[in-house]
Amino acid sequence: MKILIVGASGTIGKAITKELQSDHEIICAGRNGSDVSVDITSIDSIKTMYEKVGKLDAVVNAAGRAQFSSLVELTPELNEIGIESKLKGQINLVLLGLNYMNDNGSFTLTTGIMMDDPIRQGASAAMANGGVKAFVKSAALEMPRGIRINSVSPNAVQESWDRLKDYFQGFEAVPASRVARAFKKSVYGAQTGKNYEVY
Ligand SMILES: NC(=O)c1ccc[n+]([C@@H]2O[C@H](COP(=O)([O-])OP(=O)(O)OC[C@H]3O[C@@H](n4cnc5c(N)ncnc54)[C@H](OP(=O)(O)O)[C@@H]3O)[C@@H](O)[C@H]2O)c1
């Protein structure tokens, strides 16, 4: 299998890369990607990446930002960060990647627990997560050539806990390796239109 992992150098991306790397051709992407560079907020950049990597059996995305901000301080401009990156960035990876996906291949995107279990300062990220989840569920109905699409919704991961613990008080962080196994289930499994909750 030829698998493109966008965000491969990140906390979750590294765990996914470790989980998927045996016996597969893994292509690591990011703005400073070790194999290919891409900025998911740029349509041109996504197109250029797909032209470089060619046909694929799976696209896994673990990149995408959104602004943590209290609602009263959340401006339209700050909200755009999540729209451009976590929402549109991920969806554009699918829309622009369809022609590069082999028959029976798969896309796996990333959402997050905040859409289901809200926290303060989380409205913008929750919006993006919810949009991605809805897109996945709906797009699965019309994926051509047996192509599947799922998302993975991680809880805060233990490896990010120092950075996130003040936002997620009372949550029980999960190991990134557990999140990575949900990505593996999506890539190797038969299900489509799912949002795998790793809570
Ligand atoms: N960490 C958690 O606890 C947690 C929990 C729930 C959900 N999530 C979600 O999971 C995803 C990954 O989180 P993470 O903590 O692993 O992030 P991270 O450690 O900050 O890593 C982000 C990865 O994405 C790449 N990246 C960032 N912006 C990009 C862009 N515009 N285009 C292409 N690549 C880009 C980065 O590489 P470059 O710098 O080279 O671009 C890096 O490889 C995020 O959507 C996050 O919201 C994380």
Image: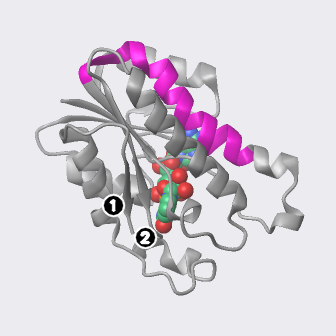
Kindly indicate the quadrant of the structure image that contains residue 196: bottom left
Kindly indicate the quadrant of the structure image that contains residue 43: top right
Per the model, the C-alpha gap separating discs 2 and 1 is: 8 Å
Residue occupying image coordinates x 63% and y 57%: 126
On residue 179, the disc is 1
Kindly indicate the quadrant of the structure image that contains residue 67: bottom right
| Numbered disc 1: secondary structure | helix
On residue 157, the disc is 2
Q: How many marks?
A: 2
Query: x and y percent of residue 46 in the render?
Result: 53, 24
Quarter placement of the C terminus:
bottom left
Q: Nearer the viewer, residue 38 or 1?
A: 1
Residue occupying image coordinates x 71% and y 60%: 123
- State if disc 1 and disc 2 touch (CB < 8 Å): yes
**Can residue 67 be spotted in the picture?**
no
Some atom of ligand 1 lies within 8 Å of the CB belonging to the residue at label 2: yes
Residue occupying image coordinates x 57% and y 78%: 168
On residue 53, the disc is none
Q: Nearer the viewer, residue 146 or 7?
A: 146
Quarter placement of the N terminus:
top left
Q: Which residues are magenta?
A: 81-104
